[in-house]
């Protein structure tokens, strides 16, 4: 019986020696994770020189230079220590990495290794206490991590998602939503800086960019810079001049026009261009491929002109509500005049009521991709918490997005309840699953803890 147990222990050690296999390229990061999460047998834990070891706080993995984990607390031989922990596959890696000459490692209170194979010293000559984990790691955690890293599925843990509590997933999505919004703060801050810290011009830019969708976002962004909101509002009481500015600065009035109204717009624009020293966006910036006619940039510009004409000061009202229905009423404009029976210049089409209205899906897109990031960013920039709260409330009151990513999540059993969750799922798939950041993911951590028990 003792012989069988000894052989089983030897087999387990050989299996966990996978960490030292050059063909298993997940060693040190995985060992840091195992230490941080306590995924090892801590019973009767001792340092390599036999001193009793109690881990009070494993520390936090940090990705900057210096020791691997900070803010650790351990008790060694009855003495409590606080400081950093360095993790290596082999103790000799300490010298291989040059830590024996680096004073930044003098405050390491514990050297955690998979295999202890050498005695090492700090720059000050101290021998850091060392703990070996070779016989204490569950090989199932190594196999789990390898399967996640090598999975070809968009979500590597998809077959195991059913093992994770729904509440844990929901809380993780709440955190990812905030992370996604915080990442977008930088985009808004850049526009805010380029517009001279003008909130109105910043929102104007965000809304126009959002109006372009994925296909024409850059072209609309160029237009926002080429046509400031203040100039556009100056002529909002005159439809012809408003449309002349929009279509002229978009580059659509450079060529001679055959129809009467476009010819009038071109003539008006030439005068406005000379008066204000304007430079239009090149017409080549606009794309029509794979767009339905109601989504053509010309139709979007006509809708925007109608919004400016009808309620040019709507921008302030957009930010005053956390009810999406109010925003739908404000932005649900329809292209008017010449554009009732045109999708582009010079090509008449049949007029159909409602066809050229800025619809619910388009307004939802503006809310999700323009208004919410703007509110969240301006709340952070100006220290106004109600705006950041309103941004999240708006997302929670909007229906979940319907796209390839949300359909993919639905197919593996994760249904978004609102736009906040769908945004979080997009963040999870694009920024976490695609980059295989499973060791930093709450879902991956949960699966490892379940495996290690």
Image (cartoon, grey):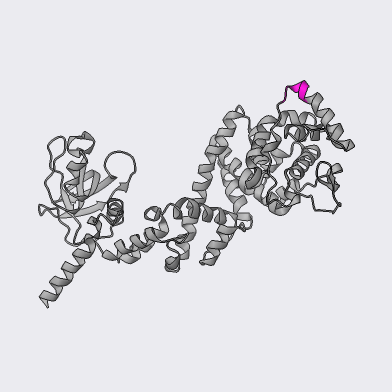
Considering the whole magenta stretch, tell me its main secondary structure: helix
Does 71 sit above or below residue 235? below
Tell me, yes or no, if residue 200 can be seen here: no
Q: Is residue 431 left or right of residue 402?
A: left
Q: Identify which residue is drawn at 87% across, 32% down.
A: 264
Residue 423 lies in the magenta-colored region:
no
Q: Where residue 236 appears, x then y in whole percent? A: 80, 33
Point out the stretch of residues depicted in magenta. Answer: 273-278
Q: Identify which residue is drawn at 85% across, 50% down.
A: 349
Q: Where residue 237 appears, x then y in whole percent? A: 83, 33
Q: Is residue 258 left or right of residue 126?
A: right
Depth check: give the residue in front, 279 or 374: 279
- The image quarter containing residue 385 is top right
Quarter of the image where the C terminus is located: bottom left
Q: Is residue 68 left or right of residue 256?
A: left
Quarter of the image where the N terminus is located: bottom left
Depth check: give the residue in front, 384 or 269: 269
Q: Residue furthest bottom?
A: 1
Q: Where residue 261 appears, x then y in whole percent? A: 87, 36
Does 397 sit above or below residue 219? below
- The image quarter containing residue 402 is bottom right
Q: Where residue 256 appears, x then y in whole percent? A: 82, 32
Q: Residue furthest right?
A: 260
């Amino acid at each position: 019986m003792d012989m069988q147990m000894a052989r089983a222990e030897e087999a387990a050690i050989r299996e966990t020696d996978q960490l030292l296999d050059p063909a298993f390229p997940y060693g040190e990061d995985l060992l840091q994770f195992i230490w941080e999460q306590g995924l090892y047998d801590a019973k009767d834990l001792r340092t390599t020189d036999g001193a009793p070891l109690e881990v009070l706080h494993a520390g936090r993995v940090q990705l900057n230079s210096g020791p691997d984990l900070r803010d650790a607390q351990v008790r060694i031989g009855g003495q409590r220590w606080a400081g950093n922990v360095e993790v290596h596959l082999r103790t000799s890696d300490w010298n291989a990495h040059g830590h024996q000459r680096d004073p930044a490692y003098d405050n390491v209170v514990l050297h955690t290794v998979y295999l202890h194979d050498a005695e090492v010293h700090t720059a000050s000559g101290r021998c850091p206490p060392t703990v070996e984990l070779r016989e204490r790691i569950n090989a199932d955690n190594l196999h789990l991590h390898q399967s996640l890293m090598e999975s070809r599925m968009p979500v590597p843990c998809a077959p195991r998602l059913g093992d994770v509590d729904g509440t844990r997933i929901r809380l993780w999505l709440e955190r990812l939503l905030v992370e996604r919004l915080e990442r977008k703060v930088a985009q808004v801050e850049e526009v805010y800086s380029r517009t001279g810290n003008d909130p109105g011009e910043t929102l104007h830019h965000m809304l126009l960019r959002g109006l372009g969708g994925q296909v024409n976002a850059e072209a609309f962004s160029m237009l926002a810079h080429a046509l400031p909101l203040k100039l556009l509002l100056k002529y909002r009481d005159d439809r012809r001049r408003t449309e002349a500015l929009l279509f002229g600065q978009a580059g659509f009035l450079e060529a001679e026009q055959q129809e009467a109204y476009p010819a009038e717009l071109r003539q008006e624009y030439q005068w406005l261009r000379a008066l204000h020293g304007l430079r239009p966006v090149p017409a080549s910036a606009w794309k029509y491929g794979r767009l339905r006619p109601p989504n053509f940039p010309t139709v979007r510009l006509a809708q925007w002109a109608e919004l400016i004409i009808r309620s040019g000061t709507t921008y302030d009202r957009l930010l005053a509500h956390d009810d999406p229905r109010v925003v739908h009423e404000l932005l649900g404009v329809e292209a008017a005049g010449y554009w009732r029976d045109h999708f582009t210049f010079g090509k008449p089409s049949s007029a159909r009521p409602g066809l050229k209205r800025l619809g619910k899906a388009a307004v939802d897109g503006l809310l999700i991709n323009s208004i919410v990031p703007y509110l969240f960013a301006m709340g952070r920039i100006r220290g106004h918490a109600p705006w950041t709260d309103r941004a999240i409330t708006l997302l929670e009151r909007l229906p979940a997005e319907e796209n390839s990513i949300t359909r993919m999540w639905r197919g593996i059993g994760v249904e978004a309840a609102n736009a906040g969750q769908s945004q979080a799922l997009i963040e999870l798939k694009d920024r976490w699953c695609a980059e295989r950041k499973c060791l930093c993911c709450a879902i991956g951590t949960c699966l490892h803890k379940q495996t290690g028990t």
